[in-house]
């Protein structure tokens, strides 16, 4: 009887944790003495080449790589601050708040330009714009929109063609989606008009870029807005089926960021990993078309890169978020 | 004998030290003042931005259904971005309750404040500058109390302060070094007239008592005036001493001369032996007084001149031959030969008058103690050093007392009945020492004494 | 008092304001057989010089009517060749130099031994030319007291100082008996311990020098010595 209860409890416990984590894999180092616990919002198969490249250079380190949604990562950390050493996320605002709240350790040895780091505690290491991904077939014979305004016009010109075929992040669920949406709203009124059009045409809402791309490939979606173009380009087979458009009016661009939790006991190994990521040496990981583009603070060539500064806290404010979501919901949800 | 007064260097060192210490104090003061001022300015600057953030937050607040709705402007936090990436904390309270933001940033109760209140306190493991403002927003049934707090860490402030402090320190140090250099130069140049004056006075010869005429700064002029008056008094006193000595000689000798003449004349007329002996001893006494007076005055003059020796180029042979000329009649009178020998001139730097005095006294001694029809001989030589040797053929110095003879008033045992005050050898010895030499006394193997002046 | 013959007399001028000293000096000089005039002031001395012809001037430096130095300067300026011996109580060598520079021939410091005065006068006059008139002749002996030479016939003998003074004494007063003690007084300084025998020695020497001159010194027991002309 007691054993049975114990088994059930263990299953429940692991079930609970399992529900929050999307994936968990151990990448073993060749002569591992240290295990680094990484929690990340990036899919394992996307990040794997980077990790193996790191382990090849640092055989003494093993990486316990866990994946969760960017909002879930914050919950996991607040529940168990001791459980992880390194946090990698695409939600810059959430990362910044972690650092602002004093949870990140200062790595004073790393010398990065100001534009890619905050307080030497939070480091950006990629450059990934939010893109509009189109189903080519759906736009056969039509002008391919290159700006949001053009997209609005395309939809207004043939609303029935696009009804139910539009997709974007559910900003209530996705941290990255919320980031992209708030930054778009900050930048231009066009965003709200686009969202209203989306809402009126029964747009689909997704938690993740991957799902949107799958549906686009199948033809269930014609337009996906604010998708991470990087995810689209991991699928070379889809290249002829999908068109990835970086909006020309403005392209909200995020930096994937990494921080080391202050509770870590493996500061050395963690610093090595951060240094590796920020060095960009993983970029030519030997694979053509690797989605993640390294960034070291150089030329951003017209992209609207989200800045690592306290302003990112604004949209995380409870009241502000409430107001934004109210506005968003009234636009997108019908 | 010269005693050295404290050197002007210590005055210069004092002056330099005082100026340098003053400069250091000023530099430090400058640094502190700049730093304090910089801190105030920097803090004010941070406070103004915090205040602006508060204002923008307050402006964005509205009351809806008794509930505060605050559409936080992006700028409210964006403006808090600093070069040091300072952390930002905020708290919005309605009444006493936290609506949104960080817990424990500000605590109730809240009172209405006309303007933002600033304080520095620890929060979340760092020191933050916090600004709080409480406004009353109109609403029904009651106005609502809105308290907004914004806080920021002080890394940027600290960085600015460090930069300013570093600059201030550099400037302060540069100023100090400059001031120290100026201090050294100033004290050296200010005190140079003192050193120049000292050198000018030191350069003078020992008998140069003319007043100091060089131009001096006004602070030194009382010193120079006193110095000049001192020198005038000294010069006057010296002249008086010289005059006194000469006058004393005259006054002592003139009556003695009179008495002696009379005694001599009387002796010629007196026949009785005991009267003759009495007169003879009287004349002897007079001669002894006269000789004593003469030698005392010589001794005084030698001491006097010896203290401020005037060294000129002189030829010892010339001096001795003049003395021989002078004393030849006296020697003849006593049937004694007085001769001089030398091999060429012997030149030294010395005082003519003192050496004349010494040699005259030695020759006088030799003539006095020489038996009749003998000779006194002077030898002047330059090897190994300049020497004047006076030899006679008398009884010689008493061996046991040679060392003492040149002390004042010592006379040897063998001269009991001869008139002499005993200062002759002392005078010669003093003159030799004043020239950095000595008097050597020895007896010759052939009998007779030899007194050698080593100069 | 013995008096020398007129042809042997040295003529001295003494300029001295101290009357007592002057009297004593003049007495002594006359005893030696010299002629001496005494002036109390410089102006009196100048008057004497205008009138008389002197062999030697004895000049005191400190005089009531002026410094002897001024007198010396004028004396030389007037190309007067009479030798001057200065008598001074000041023994400053600087004074000596200035006096000799100004034209004094020698100087004596008071109080002085009369013998020294004699010796210096003799030395000074020796340096002058034309002292022939002071030769003392007795018999075939001719004594030049200035040159200190005794000439007998063709033979010149230079005498030592005491011999000279002894002979001069005798030759100036032939026939006069001089006691030993008197001779001692005249010949030796007062601090010498002189035995009577010393006089005998000197007399003996003189007798030797005077052989064949026609004069001799005779001994008179208990009385003294006397120069006799044969």
Image: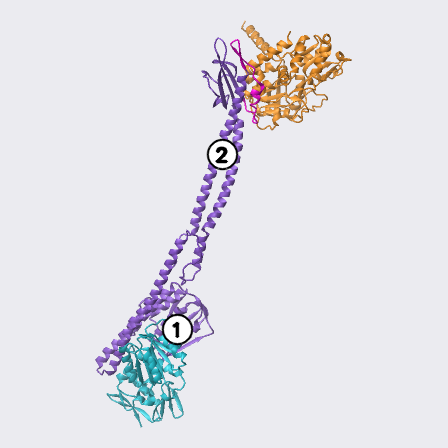
Chain colours: A orange, B purple, C cyan
- Location of residue C206 in the rendering, given as x and y in whole percent from the top left corner: 33, 88
Classed neighbour count for the residue bearing mark 2: other residues with Cα under 10 Å, few (<14), some (14–19), many (≥20):
some
Residue C34 x %, y %: 31, 85
Q: Which residue is drawn at 43% across and 73% down?
A: B318
The image quarter in which residue B307 lies: bottom left
- Viewer-nearest residue: B162 or B239: B239
B140 or C122: nearer the viewer = B140
Q: Visible in this render: residue A240?
A: yes
Span shown in magenta:
B61-87
The answer to whether residue A84 is visible is no
Instruction: State whether residue B126 is above or below residue B183.
Output: above
Tell me residue B315's x, y (percent): 45, 71
Q: Is residue B227 above or below residue B246?
A: above
Vertical relation: B171 (above or below) B126: below
In the image shown, does C89 or C65 lie closer to the viewer?
C65
Q: Does the magenta stretch include residue B13?
A: no
SS label for mark 1: helix
**In the shown orientation, is residue C173 left or right of residue B147?**
left
Left or right of residue C17, residue C147 in this image: right
- Asked whether the beta carbons under mark 1 and mark 2 sit within 8 Å of each other, the answer is no
Question: What chain does mark 1 sit on?
Answer: C
Q: Is residue B24 above or below residue B132?
A: below
Q: Name the residue under label 1.
A: C98
Marks 1/2: CA–CA distance: 82 Å
Q: Say what secondary structure mark 2 lies in.
A: helix
Which of the chains bears the disc numbered 2? B
Percent across and percent down for residue B49 are: 53, 24
- In the rendered image, the quadrant that contains the C terminus of chain B is bottom left
Q: Which mark is residue B34?
A: 2
Q: In the rendered image, which quarter is residue A71 located in?
A: top right
Question: Image quarter for residue C184?
Answer: bottom left
């Amino acid at each position: 009887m007691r054993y049975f209860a114990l088994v059930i409890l263990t299953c429940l416990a692991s079930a609970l944790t399992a529900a929050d984590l999307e994936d968990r894999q151990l990448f073993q180092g060749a002569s591992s003495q240290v295990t680094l616990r990484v929690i990340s919002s990036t899919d394992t198969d996307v990040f794997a080449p980077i990790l193996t490249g790191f382990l090849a250079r640092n055989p003494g380190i093993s990486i316990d790589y866990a994946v969760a949604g960017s909002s879930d990562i914050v919950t996991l950390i607040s529940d168990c601050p001791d459980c992880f050493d390194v946090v990698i996320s695409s939600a810059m605002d959430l990362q910044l708040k972690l650092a602002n709240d004093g949870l990140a350790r200062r790595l004073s040895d790393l010398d990065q330009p100001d534009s890619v780091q905050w307080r030497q505690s939070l480091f950006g290491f990629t450059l990934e714009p939010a893109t509009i991904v189109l189903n080519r077939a759906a736009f056969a014979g039509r002008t391919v929109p290159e700006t949001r305004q053009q997209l609005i016009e395309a939809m207004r010109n043939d609303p029935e063609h696009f009804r139910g075929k539009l997709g974007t992040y559910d900003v209530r669920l996705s941290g990255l989606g919320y980031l992209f949406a708030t930054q778009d709203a900050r930048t231009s009124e066009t965003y709200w008009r686009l969202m209203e059009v989306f809402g009126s045409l029964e747009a689909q809402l997704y938690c993740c870029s991957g799902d949107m791309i799958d549906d686009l490939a199948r033809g269930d979606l014609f337009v996906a807005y604010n998708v991470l173009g990087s995810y689209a380009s991991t699928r070379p087979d889809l290249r002829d089926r999908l068109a990835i458009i970086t909006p020309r009016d403005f392209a909200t661009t995020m930096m994937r960021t990494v921080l080391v939790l202050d509770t870590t006991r493996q500061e050395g190994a963690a610093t090595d990993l951060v240094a590796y990521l920020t060095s960009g040496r993983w970029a030519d990981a030997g694979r053509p078309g690797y989605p993640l583009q390294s960034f070291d603070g150089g030329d951003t060539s017209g992209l609207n890169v989200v800045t690592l500064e306290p302003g990112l806290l604004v949209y995380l404010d409870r009241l502000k978020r409430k107001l934004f979501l109210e506005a968003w919901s009234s636009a997108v949800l019908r | 004998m010269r005693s050295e007064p404290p050197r002007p260097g210590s005055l210069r060192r004092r002056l330099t030290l005082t100026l340098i210490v003053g400069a250091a104090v000023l530099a430090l003061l400058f640094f502190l003042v700049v730093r304090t001022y910089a801190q105030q300015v920097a803090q004010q600057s941070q406070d103004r931005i915090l205040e602006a953030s508060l204002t923008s937050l307050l402006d964005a607040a509205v009351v809806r259904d008794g509930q505060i709705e605050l559409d936080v402007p992006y700028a409210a936090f964006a403006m808090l971005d600093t070069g040091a990436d300072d952390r930002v904390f905020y708290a919005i309270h309605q009444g006493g309750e936290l609506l949104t933001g960080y817990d424990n940033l500000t605590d109730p109760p809240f009172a209405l404040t006309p303007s933002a209140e600033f304080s520095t306190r620890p929060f979340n493991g760092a020191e933050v500058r916090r600004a709080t403002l409480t406004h009353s927003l109109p609403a029904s049934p009651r106005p609502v109390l809105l308290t907004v707090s914004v806080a920021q860490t002080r890394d940027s402030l600290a960085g600015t302060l460090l930069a300013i402090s570093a600059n201030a320190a550099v400037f302060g140090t540069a100023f100090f070094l400059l001031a120290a250099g100026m201090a050294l130069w100033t004290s050296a140049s200010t005190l140079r007239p003192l050193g120049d004056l000292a050198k000018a006075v030191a350069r003078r010869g020992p008998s140069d008592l003319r007043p100091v005429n060089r131009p001096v700064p006004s602070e030194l002029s009382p010193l120079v005036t006193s110095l000049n008056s001192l020198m005038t008094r000294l010069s006057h006193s010296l002249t008086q001493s010289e005059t006194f000595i000469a006058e004393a000689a005259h006054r002592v000798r003139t009556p003695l001369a009179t008495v002696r003449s009379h005694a001599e004349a009387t002796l010629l007329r007196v026949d009785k032996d005991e009267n003759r002996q009495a007169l003879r001893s009287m004349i002897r006494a007079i001669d002894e007084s006269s000789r004593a007076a003469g030698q005392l005055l010589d001794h005084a003059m030698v001491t006097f001149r010896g203290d401020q020796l005037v060294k000129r180029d002189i030829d010892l042979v010339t001096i001795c031959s003049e003395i021989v000329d002078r004393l030849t009649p006296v020697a003849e009178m006593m049937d004694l030969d007085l001769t001089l020998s030398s091999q060429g001139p012997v030149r030294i730097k010395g005082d003519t008058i003192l050496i004349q005095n010494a040699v005259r006294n030695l020759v006088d001694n030799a003539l006095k103690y020489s038996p009749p029809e003998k000779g006194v001989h002077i030898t002047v030589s330059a090897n190994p050093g300049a020497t004047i040797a006076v030899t006679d053929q008398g009884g010689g110095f008493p061996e046991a007392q040679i060392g003492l003879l040149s002390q004042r008033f010592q006379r040897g045992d063998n001269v009991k009945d001869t008139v002499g005050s005993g200062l002759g050898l002392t005078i010669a010895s003093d003159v030799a020492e004043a020239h950095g030499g000595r008097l050597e006394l020895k007896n010759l193997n052939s009998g007779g004494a030899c007194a050698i002046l080593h100069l | 008092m013995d008096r020398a013959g007129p042809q042997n007399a040295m003529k001295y001028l003494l300029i001295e304001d101290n009357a007592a000293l002057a009297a004593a000096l003049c007495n002594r000089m006359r005893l030696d057989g010299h002629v001496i005039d005494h002036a109390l002031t410089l102006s009196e001395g100048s008057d004497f010089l205008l009138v008389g012809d002197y062999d030697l001037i004895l000049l005191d430096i400190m005089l009531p009517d002026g410094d002897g130095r001024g007198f010396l300067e004028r004396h030389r300026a007037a190309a007067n060749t009479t030798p001057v011996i200065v008598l001074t109580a000041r023994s400053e060598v600087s004074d000596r130099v200035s006096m000799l520079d100004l034209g004094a021939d020698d100087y004596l410091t008071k109080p002085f031994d009369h013998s020294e005065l004699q010796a210096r006068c003799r030395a000074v006059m020796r340096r002058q030319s034309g002292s022939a008139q002071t030769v003392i002749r007795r018999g075939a002996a001719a004594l030049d007291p200035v040159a200190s030479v005794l000439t007998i016939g063709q033979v010149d003998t230079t005498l030592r100082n005491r011999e000279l003074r002894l002979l001069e004494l005798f030759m100036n007063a032939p026939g006069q008996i001089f006691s030993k003690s008197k001779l001692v007084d005249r010949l030796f300084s007062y601090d010498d311990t002189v035995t009577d025998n010393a006089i005998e020695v000197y007399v003996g020497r003189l007798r030797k020098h005077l052989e064949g001159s026609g004069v001799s010194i005779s001994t008179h027991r208990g009385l003294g010595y006397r120069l006799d002309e044969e």
